[in-house]
Each structure stands twice: as structure tokens, then as C-alpha cells.
Image (tube, grey):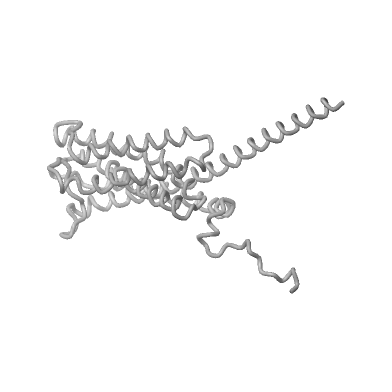
Amino acid sequence: MNANKMPSTNKPKNWFSALAHPGVFLGWSRHFIRPLIFLTLISFAIGLWFAFFNSPPDYQMGETVRIMYIHVPNAWLAQMVYSIMAISAIGSLVWRHPLADVAMKAAAPLGAAFTAIALFTGALWGRPTWGTYWEWDGRMTSTLVLFLMYLGLVALWNTFSDQSKGARIIAVFTLVGAINIPIIKFSVEWWNALHQPSIISTQGLSMPAEIYTPLLIMTLAFSLLFFTLHLVNMRAEIFRRRANTLERQHVIENAQASAANNGKGENK
């Protein structure tokens, strides 16, 4: 058989395997950053206009309902980002996908930021609505626990000089912490809480369309913001790891060259 006609064994079997190569990811992902930035800015412009200039005040909460347009999307993202991290942890542990731990690490600081905004805006909203900035009910407490988990995972990533070796350990911790997501989700139904139930239920929407529409647009805007920043963070992490690898190789080569020169000097 002609060696030139032999099938290549290095070709990826499917698109999932192809994405496992960081170079492939860097190639296609760079084309998405500018469109995502554009869509994010447009969504925020439309959402903020609806939220502050084209939506009525609530009949009970008045103008303070506008805090909801910031609070609810960030509270939603606090849970969604951790869910993405949990899925990435499975990809790291089960399939050992090279991009899984990159996605997991890149999402952690973003999740912490969204959770912090959710907690802060929730406190601002709680004062005029409930008469207190903070109440140790199920949802507030479990969301605070989520924030601390994010901070812990970010700190844990920083303890490993070799990120690929620490990824499996961190993936296990991430999956264990995922039990908190359904607790946050169903805490209102499980325990007596100040929080209202989900705005979408089997009975339909729990708010008028004039308020739900800007909320939906703002949720889309913040979600696009996350995907944009997550993509940028993943690319930065890949470049950082490549730089660290080159630096380690350079140190090893210098050490080998120094040892070789010392050996030549002793032989003279």
C-alpha cells in the first residue's frame, strides 16, 4: 500500500473531539467575540430603555420594582453559571476534555461577580419591600453559600501551579457543591421565605407583560454578557497556559544547557 494514501489517524473522529484541541477553539472563537459584544450592547440599550423609561411602576412596590431588572437576571446567572461549571466538571472527569477545565475555571470568577450583584441588589430591594436588608431565609442563605463556594473555587484554582493537575480535584469539589443549586431553586417551596415563587409557573406569568418584557430583555443582555466574557476568559486562560508551558520548557532547557556546560568544564 502506498504510504501517501494511508488514512490519517490524527484526524478527529467528530466535532466534539475536534473541539478538544485548544488551537481549534482559538481559531473559531475569535470570530464570535465582536458579534457577541455588539449583541450585548444592543440588548442592554433596549433593555435599559424598557426598564427605566417604558415600563410602569408596580402597584405594590412602586418604582423600586426597577431593581428587579438587575437583580433577577444576576440571580438567574448565579445559578446558571454554576450549572455550566458542573457540566464542565463532568466533561473533565468523564471525557477528560481539555477545554472542560478551561471552561470551568473561566466561569468561576464570573459566577462570583453575578452572585455578588444579586446579593447586593437583593439587599437594596429588600429594604423598601420587606423592611430589612437581610433575612436569613432559605434562598438568601443558600445564595450566600453559593457566593462563598465561588470564592473558594477561585482560591482553589490559584493554589495549583499546574492547572491541568488541579482540574480533576476542583471538578470533584464543583460537583459536590452543585447540590446547592436545587436548594436555591426550591427553597421558596420547601421553607417559609420572603421571596416570591418563580415568575413562571403552570398557571402562567405572575406579572404583567409590561414588566415581564423588560425583565426578559435584561436577562438576555446579562446572559450575552456572560457568554462574551466567558469566551474571552477561556481564550485568555489557554494563552496563559501556553505561556506557562513555554516558560517551564525554557527553564528546563537552560538547566540542561547549564549542566552540559558544567560537565564540559569538569572534563577539561
Quarter placement of the C terminus: top right
Q: Quadrant of residue 170?
A: top left
Q: Is residue 48 visible?
A: no
Q: Where is 200 relative to 48, above or below?
A: below
Residue placed at 40% from the left, 37% from the top? 153
Left or right of 118 in this view: 259: right
Residue 251 x/y as whole percent: 67, 33
Nearest the camera: 180 or 260? 260
Is 205 left or right of 155, judged from the image as shown? left
Query: Which residue is farthest bottom?
Result: 1
Spot occupied by residue 207 in the image (x, y as percentages of width and height): 18, 52
- At 57% from the left and 41% from the top, the residue drawn is 241
User: Is 258 displayed left or right of 230 in the figure?
Assistant: right
The residue located at (48%, 40%) in the rendering is 166
Q: Position of residue 260 (x, y in %)?
A: 78, 32
Q: Is residue 8 left or right of residue 63?
A: right
Q: Relative to the observer, which residue lies in front, 263 or 143? A: 263
* 122 or 78, nearer to the observer: 78
133 shown above or below 9: above
Q: Position of residue 98 (x, y in %)?
A: 52, 50
Residue 224 in view in this figure? yes
Residue positioned most to the front = 267
The number of discs equals 0
Q: What residue is rendered at 43% in x and 49% in y?
A: 227
Quarter occupied by residue 52: top left
For the N terminus, the quadrant is bottom right
